[in-house]
Amino acid sequence: MQDAQLVSVAQALISAWVPVTLALTLAVALSLYHCVERKPVDIDPSMDIDYFMLSGAPLPRPLPDFDLDRAKPRPYRPFRWRYHQTMALAPLEHDWWIELESTYKFRVNQRQYLYTKHGSAVLQSMPGSEAACKEMMYMVIQFLCARYPNHFQFDKNTCGFTNRILGTSDDIDTVHPLQFLLNNVPEDFLVTQKDPGTGEYFLRAAVCCSAIGFNMTGKMGRPLREIHGPVPDYEWKLKTSVDKFFDRMPVEKPIQRGSWSFEVGQPLYLQANDPEYMEHKRENPNLRIEDVYLRIDWQTLRRLPQSKAILFNFKALFTPVTQLQEEPYIPQLILKVLKEGPASIKKYKGWSHLEHRLLPALEVYARDQVSRGLVPEGWQERTLDEQPFFPGWQSVSG
């Protein structure tokens, strides 16, 4: 399949409203970059290697005065109308690969509890992924120490990593990379590797504590075409292009995008066999809008420069729906998507049980923004110029 054909697949994907998944990220991203084939290299991960220099992606600018307790996540609002209007992917903002904010301690503790409870369902790796996992850990360490120098330090003499936020330390020569990530970074990391025999990419290692209805049981070691089978239109629009994109993704151009949904409360990890799962999806006539949250899963994708594995990571961010009334254009844009989006995507995202409270509230917020002059009367819904943010977003971020 040639570049033009793959771009055509990506364009069709967007116009068809296929939801955000790892597969979507891969297919759509091709339209942003001219990718070249990469040859494998000998793999010997080491903290003596500057992985960012090796990849051609710069280290982040340092934040020596960073105040974790006051830091708020950037208000990602990846809403688009119509989906064919603009690509959903963008080059990664290198400073924001890993973003710390005030929920850091709570989320780390929550994720550690989930691992204690669920074990290999949230953290698992396969033989052959060791070098890629170490390389991933080293890149994360280099990023954290560069971005947050007063909070994280690494001693090359002792191979010790110090987390001053939590008052902990790790010997990176002995700790498993996935365990290190679980203990220090409140984000999910998934490693995929190419099978030289079939040419397909397989999930080989992951720490994944932020999933609704998805876990490592039955997924680890499977090719992407099987993992993404339930996604609408994946079979005929994506399956043949994903692995080809992986083969040609350059190390110097990581990408970012966001997925969104609405939830009752802030469920970080919920599975179909959990007692709360069915209750979570049941319509509650007494539901209060104050209990409904916008969930954003902000995602990045990059090729590791040494092992050539593909690293996917994401974090879950929750915002009370009531806060959206202060975000210009967002309520009206969401209403357009909820009311006129394809039924298949509505079913896939699973928000129908919230509509009886969500839609009326958003309609009130949208009218109020017009009356307050935050949105011009008669504004026609479209993807915002500030996407994935909104006008004035800096005032609500830390």
Image: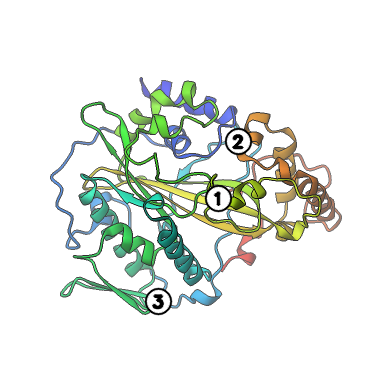
Residue underneath mark 2: 348
Element type at mark 3: loop
Q: Give the image's coloring scheme.
A: rainbow
Tag in front: 1 or 3:
1
Secondary structure beneath disc 2?
helix
Q: Which residue, given by chain and number where applicable, does mark 1 sit on?
A: 274
Q: Which residue is mark 3?
A: 166
The residue shown at (52%, 54%) is 269
319 in relation to 13, above or below: below
Badge 3 density bin: few <14, some 14–19, many ≥20, Cα 10 Å: some
Callout 2: 10 Å neighbours few (<14), some, many (20+)? few
Image label count: 3
- Comparing labels 1 and 2, the label whose residue is closer to the camera: 1
For this rendering, which residue is in front, 253 or 351? 351
Q: Which badge, 1 or 3, is on the more N-terminal residue?
A: 3
Q: Quadrant of residue 82?
A: top right
